[in-house]
Image (cartoon, rainbow, N blue to C red):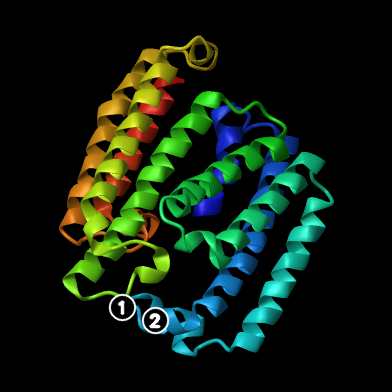
Amino acid sequence: MKNGLVLLPLLMAHQANNLDAGLSALGAFVAFCCGASFVYICNDILDLESDRQHRSKRNRPLASGALSVKTALVLGGLALIVAGTLVAFLPPKFGVLLGLYLIISSAYSLKIKSMIVADILVLALLYTLRILAGAFAAEVHVSHWLLLFSMFFFLSLACVKRFSELRLVKLGNGADSSRRGYQAEDLELISQCGCASGYLSVLVLALYVSSKEVMTLYAWPQAIYMLCPLLLYWITRVWLLAHRGEVHDDPIVFALTDRVSYGVGLVAGIIILAAI
């Protein structure tokens, strides 16, 4: 689902009916899935012991013992080969960005995830890199508004992730967070930063609707304003539920299992179609 962001620039540029661009975007999506899988496998091997002590991560294939380390490394290597093969058929700029993603995500697994503040900024950056890579692959223009929105929006979600982990530590139900660099006392500050970042993403969306760019893409651009209160509702609700301890460690997983999130997504889709 995270790598689905690679397809977003194609849709935002209204080029979904462009067959060549669509095939390139699809190839980029598969390449990102394979490349990211390699990094995730390596990360899970590095975090094997700590994951086995975690309330939910202990159910992952490697941590639970359902998948051996040797088999995981073979699968990871094959995924990396597939990613490299696909890159050969895509624009060079995409290959450079995928390589940059692999380097940064590997650095995150090895060191950055234990660096306070830098870790959540890098998580948000990795989401944004997916969007930029999708634009390079499909060779479509990516708006600076979209990149700004994604940076603030995904920074908020990264804060939700850290907040949920720290909340469990504070309650005594989670693994020690010292290796992450955070303390239980940082809980409220992370919450404030996450809420502020989420609301800034709504502000960027509102400014985008007021820009000249939107006039050329939508027949009724004013309709997009209705996305602002919808997004405000979703972000506020996620943070409220996070404070109650009802959000999964990964907010993306939460969104995929939350009926209200599906409803919000459906309404947002209707609004965008009306604007077109």
| Circle 2 crowding by C-alpha within 10 Å: few under 14, some 14–19, many from 20 | some
Q: Residue at x 59, y 45 (%)?
A: 130
The amino acid type of the residue labelled 2 equals Arg
Q: Is residue 90 above or below residue 270?
A: below
Q: Residue at x 70, y 80 (%)?
A: 74
**x, y percent for residue 58:** 39, 81
Q: Secondary structure at mark 2?
A: helix
State which quadrant residue 227 falls in: top left
**x, y percent for residue 190:** 29, 49
Q: Residue at x 35, y 41 (%)?
A: 265
**x, y percent for residue 29:** 64, 51
Closer to us: 46 or 115:
115
Q: Left or right: where does residue 220 sit relative to residue 9?
A: left
Closer to us: 63 or 159:
159
Q: Left or right: where does residue 49 sit relative to residue 36?
A: left
Instruction: State whether residue 59 appears in this view.
Output: no
Instruction: State whether residue 217 appears in this view.
Output: yes
Q: Residue at x 59, y 43 (%)?
A: 129
Q: Which residue is mark 2?
A: 58
Q: Which residue is mark 1?
A: 55
Closer to us: 1 or 220:
1
- CB atoms of marks 1 and 2 within 8 Å: yes
